[in-house]
Amino acid sequence: MITARAYDTHMDRLFERIKRLHAALDSAGIEYRVVGGLAVFFQVSLRRPGRGRSTEDVDIAVDRKELERIAEAVEKFGFRYRHVAGIDMLVEAEVPRASTAVHMVFVNEKVRAEYLEPVPGFSEPTRTEEGILLAPVADLVKMKLTSFRMKDQLHLKDLDSARLITAEIEASLAEPLRTRLAEVRAAQ
């Protein structure tokens, strides 16, 4: 049966997952940043409530040297570390599905060899009221322009329509990324 509450249920689960993850990493003193679609959602929603796009999973940037500590820290919060098909993730212990897992990327490393730039290092985070650490907009823009899939381009449009991609951020981009940003803007 279809229910109008389905979206709320999805978002409640997503936010519950990120709060547990934050509690696990924060209690262990492990630095992280929420990146990807959820970080874009938070950043856009802060500026333009109701305009952020939903996402299915959680993506975080961490330091690869902390992987063992991360795996240990998240266990008591209901997650298990898995490396599947070249992807490092934290799956729910009770329902271990990759589609709803926390996917990890590593700071200062390229996600894929062909990507133009590595994941940015730890810049000053944006914090939610709950203390969750988000990658700043400048880092999100670089990451979205680097991966440049269709969903990344939509996220860039969302950030731009919320006027979050400032002239300062644009000026900090390498030329190939500025070219991609111009492509996204031209397609609007």
Image: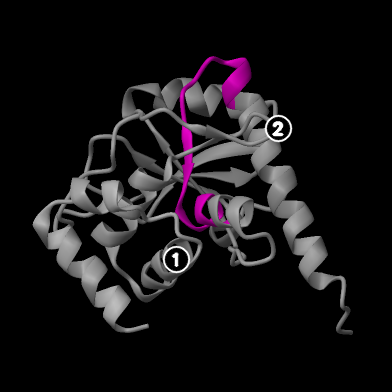
Q: Is residue 20 magenta?
A: no
Image x and y of residue 155, in percent? 44, 66
Q: Is residue 116 rendered to the left or right of residue 41?
A: left
Which quadrant is the N terminus positioned in? Answer: bottom right
Which residue does the image show at 63% across and 16% down from the upper left? 27
- What residue is pinned by disc 1? 155
Furthest residue to the front? 167
- Magenta residues, start to end: 25-41
Q: Is disc 1 placed on a helix, strand or loop?
A: helix
The amino acid type of the residue labelled 1 equals His
Which quadrant is the C terminus positioned in? Answer: bottom left
Image x and y of residue 152, in percent? 38, 66
The amino acid type of the residue labelled 2 equals Glu
Looking at the picture, does residue 188 appear above or below residue 35? below
**Quadrant hosting residue 163:** bottom left
Nearest the viewer among 93 and 54 is 54
Label 2 – label 1 distance at C-alpha: 23 Å
Image x and y of residue 16, in percent? 74, 44
Looking at the picture, does residue 38 appear above or below residue 121? below
Q: First in sequence, mark 2 or 1: give its number.
A: 2
Q: Is residue 168 rendered to the left or right of residue 10?
A: left
Which residue does the image show at 38% across and 50% down from the upper left? 140
Nearest the viewer among 70 and 36 is 36
Q: Is disc 2 placed on a helix, strand or loop?
A: loop
Which residue does the image show at 81% across and 62% down from the upper left? 9
Marker disc for residue 130: 2
Looking at the picture, does residue 122 appear above or below residue 180? above
Residue 75 seen by the camera: no
